[in-house]
Amino acid sequence: MQKDDLKIFTGNSNPDLADKICEILKHPCGKAVVSKFNDGEVRVEIGENVRGADVYVIQTGANPVNDSLMELLVMIDALKRASAGRITAVIPYYAYSRQERKGKPRAPISAKLVADLLVAAGVSRILTMDLHASQIQGFFNIPVDNLFASPILLPYLKKNFAEDVVIVSPDTGGATRAKAYASRLGTDLALIYKSRAEVGKIELMNVVGDVKGKTAIILDDMIDTGGTLIRTCDLILGKGASKVFSCVTHGIFSGDAHEKIQKSNLSGVICTDTLPVDKNGNSKLEVLSTAEIFAHAIKNIHNNESISELFEITY
């Protein structure tokens, strides 16, 4: 494909990230109107020719999530009907990913529903980062590239945290990720054991591993309200840790999360810009950009080149 065949569009979910990606690629963002009718329905008009083009739609699952999702679906439909050659949905944070299996009777598998909606709309490929559960890739019968934030986060941790560090997994599900980080950083590993009475409510928490006198880094894929994170922080400090930091890919920060984190005993929070982050006076927050890795992935996919190098970590 020629460079003229490359088209990049964005909705309203994270325009700053889209602008950074386009700047790195030295390619203008495509012309499109993405707004609403008076009753709240999504209105989309593609403002340039996309016939036969290799199109990338950058749209993350930002709050309000339903608006972001509908914008993406309607944009894909508009591009498909305009005869785009290939449509890749660049979804830095895949919304509805937390219900990826049927854990209880009469429960939905929302992540699969969203996958079906995207495919039905006409998407050809998915490019995302740090899915909440890797099996979500299997919900699609089209290519899915699940990038990792580790090439961004690990060098930052390596540079800013030197000695007496322990990587903490906030649950058993994140143990594999935490073990990989601890191995790369040459640090100790600890695990938080939880039992939940229901979604969002925890009955019991305990620390498995030695955190005494160490700087603990709680590693997770996302922060939502911050309530469980703050409780975990206090538990680790109660076990003798000197400081506690949080390191995540997706900073959702629902409700008064920023205020709670600012007032908490956390020493700092590191996240990426897969979601738009307004610090709202949260001086403890450090935001790292994913633009470089997404731009590199778009370039390689467009040129039909491998993206496996994006999973490699160099210091």
Image (spheres, helix red, strand yellow):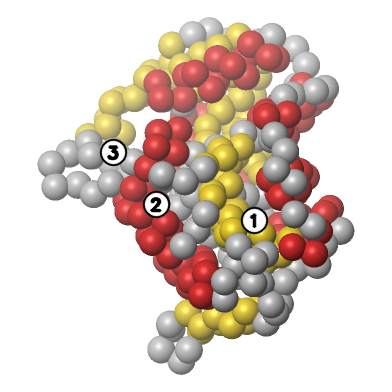
127 lies above or below 313: below
- Could you tell me how far apart the alpha carbons at marks 3 and 1 are, in whole angstroms? 29 Å
Numbered disc 3: secondary structure: loop
Q: Is residue 294 visible?
A: no
Among numbered discs 3 and 1, the one appearing first in the sequence: 3
The residue under the point 45% across, 53% down is 95
Task: Name the front one of labels 3 and 2.
Answer: 2
Query: Circle 3 is placed at which residue position?
Result: 101
* Residue type of the residue flagged with mark 2: Ala
Instruction: Specify the quadrant that holds the C terminus.
Output: top right
Q: Across the whole image, how many numbered discs are drawn on residues?
A: 3
Numbered disc 1: secondary structure: loop
- Could you tell me how far apart the alpha carbons at marks 3 and 2 are, in whole angstroms? 13 Å
Where residue 244 sits in the image (x, y, percent)? 61, 27
Judge from the rendering whether residue 7 lies leftward or rightward of residue 64; answer left or right.
Answer: right
Label at residue 115 = 2
* Residue type of the residue flagged with mark 1: Val
The residue under the point 22% across, 36% down is 103
